[in-house]
Amino acid sequence: MNVFAAAALASDPFGVLGISASRNGGTLSVPMQIVLLLTLLALLPAAVMSVTPFLRITVVLHFLRQALGTQTAPSNQVLLGLALFLTIVIMQPTIAEVYHRGWEPMEAGQLTTTQALEESAKPLHTFLQRYAREKDIALFVQMSHAPAPRNPADLDLRVLIPAYILSELKTGFQIGAVLYLPFLVIDLVVASLTLSVGMVQLPPVMISAPFKILLFVLVDGWNLVVGSLLKSFYS
């Protein structure tokens, strides 16, 4: 047993790393706590993808790759990595506020775990509320049969999170449709030209792909797309 484990055991002989043994049957057993912890860790990637800008960014990048017609270039790993780092850049102020309002006071013993979770949820609540549409919020308020909130701060996360997801999906599809239009024009022009000269055996997509890539490079497309995505969250 190392020094840190010994110190943790000395400070709380019934629990280490947040897993506490049952005291007089009043708490969950250690195996059940481990199962719950592993379940939460398994759900963490879904939460990261759903309640962060990761959702909008991945949808837009997928539409961009489809519009370019490059199939698997860039690869899924590259697009997901780019989306993840852009998400970290956008969420950094919110993450820092969650850390300062929830984790630091709890670590200092000023807040209990429940109070720390409530304080940590407030910055996330503010972020989700900023980008969730009123129409989507009203839908989930109605479906959950919850009383109408008097102000935005009264919205529950179980209403706000799905409303945010729907709003982000709509925004991502809107941006993707706008990205598609110039490349669609190139496809139509190339298809008309190939049909007019009788090149029916050569797929028009094969001819238009280099022109679309060249246009994207000439206008510095990655800078424009990434810049527009970042600005959409800071506007």
Image (tube, grey):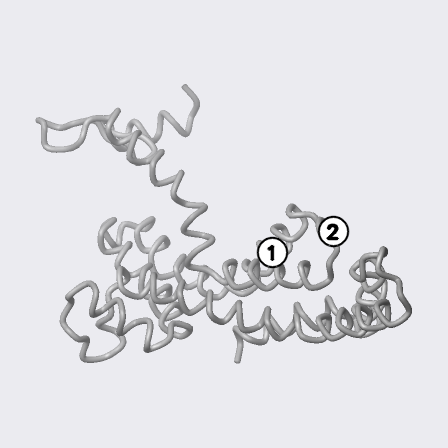
Kindly identify the amino acid type of the residue bearing the numbered disc 2: Ala
Task: Please state which of residues 114 and 210 is positioned toward the viewer in this rendering.
Answer: 210
Q: Residue at left 52%, top 80%?
A: 235
Instruction: Give the spatial CA distance, label 2 vs label 1.
Output: 19 Å
Q: Residue at left 62%, top 75%?
A: 178
Q: Residue at left 50%, top 63%?
A: 53
Residue 60 image-quadrant placement: bottom right
Kindly identify the amino acid type of the residue bearing the numbered disc 1: Phe
User: How many other residues sit within 10 Å of disc 2, few (<14), some (14-19) or many (≥20)?
Assistant: few
Q: Which residue is identified by label 2?
A: 73
Mark 1 lies on a secondary structure that is: helix
Q: Position of residue 103 (x, y in %)?
A: 36, 53
Q: Does 38 sit above or below residue 6?
A: below
Mark 2 lies on a secondary structure that is: loop
**Marks 2, 1: nearer the viewer:** 2
Q: Position of residue 24 (x, y in %)?
A: 8, 26
Q: Does 95 sit above or below residue 196?
A: above
Q: Position of residue 54 (x, y in %)?
A: 52, 58
**Of the image marks 2 and 1, the number of the one nearer the N terminus:** 2
Residue 63 image-quadrant placement: bottom right
User: How many other residues sit within 10 Å of disc 1, few (<14), some (14-19) or many (≥20)?
Assistant: few
> Disc number at residue 181?
none
> Disc number at residue 85?
1
**7 relative position to 195: left or right:** left
Q: Quadrant of the N terminus?
A: top left
Q: Position of residue 80 (x, y in %)?
A: 60, 51
